[in-house]
Amino acid sequence: MPGPSRRCLPLLALLISGCALQGVPSASGIPSLAAATVPPTPAATVAPTASPSPTPTPAPTATPDPSLMELEATSCPGGVVLDWSASTHPDFHHYIALRSPNAEIAPAYPPIAPAVDWGDTYETDPFVTSAVDASILPGPTSWNYRVIAYDVDGRVVSASAVRSGRISEVVDLGELTVSSTRDGNRLAWQPYAGSPSCFSFYRVVSGGSVLSVISDQDTASLETDALHPGTTYQLGVQAVRVTTLGSFMVGQTDTITYTVP
């Protein structure tokens, strides 16, 4: 059989080339795609890294001003109680409280009139911060107070604001009654009904001696075996307010004479 003509050779070459592009039969009879494009492997998803929560910054604590002190003046029957905050100044040497009828009190020492130092508040311990003013008679006048801390040379290192207080009349605790009991004697009086800020304890006295001290403000009687039969006593009860730098009576009974049966 005659071979293909020269005219057919280019066409045959083109067909052979097309078959190569379409794939060469494999042993299984399925053509392999030699020129097929392999799809890319998707990139692994990376979980986002959690950012640490910011640590809150605490607000700065204000440093107390060593030149300032707090002061509270409590008006009571028989006196005024002064309570102040301790001086933190490194040059502290002593306290003195001043009293004046004027609302302005200069801290200088000696006091500038009409301010006065009544003599009961000089203290070198910075943590003794309570005193009383019972140096004047009760009345309607409102007095002004200021506590000042000084260095060893008398220079002002700390000072309080000015606070006011009034001294009222001592309260009557009624008539003291005494009666004989099986175990001794019973004393009774009216309780002090004023502010607890003005009360520390009752003091039961016989002449110049103290028979008993009672710290409960609501208590109004005492059973005692300290009074001896046939003996005469001068008895009384006092309600007292006490601080480290002084004390005063806020209430009292009349003094009675009692002879024990």
Image (spheres, rainbow, N blue to C red):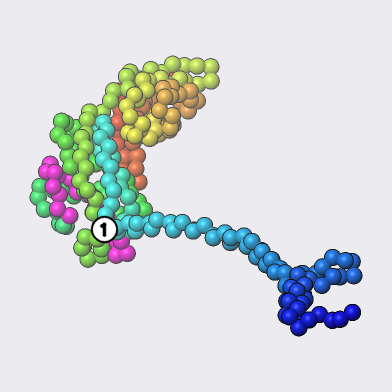
Q: Main secondary structure of the magenta part?
A: loop
Q: Position of residue 55 (x, y in %)?
A: 49, 58
* Left or right: residue 42 compared with residue 198: right
Q: Position of residue 62 (x, y in %)?
A: 34, 56
Q: Is residue 238 above or below residue 133?
A: above
* Residue 230 visible in image: no
Q: Which residues are magenta?
A: 89-107
Q: Is residue 161 magenta?
A: no
Q: Nearer the viewer, residue 32 or 181?
A: 32
Q: Outermost residue, left direction? A: 113
Q: Outermost residue, bottom direction? A: 6
* Residue 33 visible in image: yes
Q: Which amino acid type corresponds to the residue marked 1 in the rendered image?
A: Ser
Q: Is residue 106 magenta?
A: yes
Task: Find numbered disc 1 in the image and state the secondary structure of the residue it sits on.
Answer: loop
Q: Position of residue 116 (x, y in %)?
A: 15, 48
The residue carrying mark 1 is: 67
Q: Is residue 149 above or below residue 258?
A: below
Identify the residue shown where x is 15% and y is 30%. Answer: 140
Identify the residue shown where x is 33% and y is 18%. Answer: 175
